[in-house]
Image (spheres, grey):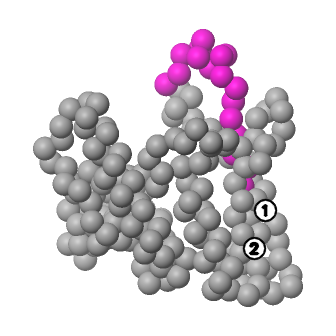
Amino acid sequence: MDFFQLFVPDNVLKNMVVQTNMYAKKFQERFGSDGAWADVTLAEMKAFLGCVISTSTSHCESVLSIWSGGFYSNPSLALVMSQARFEKILKYFHVVAFRSSQTTHGLYKVQPFLDSLQNGFDSAFRPSQTQVLHEPLIDEDPVFIATCTERELRKRKKRKFSLWVRQCSSTGFIIQVSPGLALEAKGTVW
């Protein structure tokens, strides 16, 4: 988590706490009270993100594997936070909870986090002169598409996200990440 905080300072994490609590409140106002919910704290947000990061580096099938008792279980992480609390935070987790009328792209909800990462990359690392540029194109979530009716699918344009990643070739460190939303009919929109 210390390494993570080189790139994502406490003010960004505090904003995640505020946005998550705001979203939970709005969600419960609209759909009814959730008696098991308590506002998330900064310490819990750090523990939550630590669990997510930990499972991504150990290639678990699911973040819930921590509490499973199987091969990917992690008893030391399971003591940090209960599975029920983790699932509640996951249910309401938001980086940016509400759409501003000034947003122009579909990735506005993660942009503050990406900006923070970029600032951290710039301040913590000096890359070599040899660098690599990757541009993978990521399709929209197939589970979401599978739940749409045929009429809804015809009405909406298929969205793809392109992700420009600049990487230091000697260390493998990612220097820059720039997401873009590409529309099949119009080309790339940045």
Residue 119 location, quadrant:
bottom right
Is residue 184 left or right of 161 when viewed as pictured?
A: right
Badge 2 amino acid: Gln
Instruction: Residue 39: give x, y in percent of width and height.
Output: 23, 56
Q: Quadrant of residue 74?
A: bottom left
From the top left corner, tell me how far across and down residue 101 is, in percent.
Answer: 58, 38
Tell me the magenta residue range.
Answer: 147-163
In this rendering, position of residue 133 left or right of residue 3: right
Q: Which mark is residue 152?
A: none
Look at the numbered discs 2 and 1 and tell me whether their residues touch, using CB distance below 8 Å.
yes
Give the residue drawn at x 65%, y 84%.
123
Residue 73 seen in the current view: no
Tell me the element at label 1: strand
Q: Amino acid at mark 1?
A: His
Dot 1: within a 10 Å radius of its alpha carbon, few (fewer than 14), some, or many (20 or more) residues? few
23 above or below 95? above
**Residue situated furthest left in the rendering:** 35
> Would residue 28 appear left or right of 7 to someone viewing this image?
left
Tell me the residue that label 1 is attached to: 134
Image location (x, y in percent) of residue 104? 67, 41
